[in-house]
Amino acid sequence: MPQMAPLNWLSLFILFILIYMMFNFINYYSFLYTPKSIKSLKVFKKNNWKW
């Protein structure tokens, strides 16, 4: 029935928004950030280049 079309569009919109949000959350939390160790920073600071 044509009267039900807006409800179909709304449910599809909500479904796609939820899939989009889940995709973004999975990508955000699956990234593992590994900070540089303090030892490597000290080695870098030790090399003072005299040009």
Image: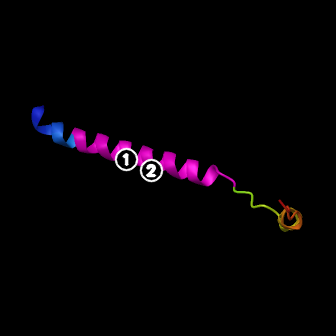
In percent of width and height, residue 45 lies at 84, 67
What residue do we see at 30% from left, 43% from top? 13
In percent of width and height, residue 49 lies at 85, 61
Which region of the structure is painted magenta? Answer: 8-32
Asked whether residue 38 is drawn in magenta, I would say no
Q: Amino acid at mark 1?
A: Ile
Left or right of residue 22, residue 36 in this image: right
Per the image, the residue denoted by label 2 is 21
Asked whether residue 31 is drawn in magenta, I would say yes
In percent of width and height, residue 34 lies at 74, 57
- Measure the C-alpha gap from mark 1 to mark 2: 6 Å
Q: Residues within 10 Å of mark 1 (few under 14, many from 20)?
A: few
Which corner quadrant of the image does residue 20 belong to?
A: top left
Quadrant containing the C terminus is: bottom right
Q: Farthest residue in the front direction? A: 51
Per the image, the residue denoted by label 1 is 17
Relative to 35, is 17 above or below?
above
What residue do we see at 23% from left, 39% from top? 8
Q: Residues within 10 Å of mark 2 (few under 14, many from 20)?
A: few
Frontmost residue, 31 versus 1: 31
Left or right of residue 2, residue 9 in this image: right
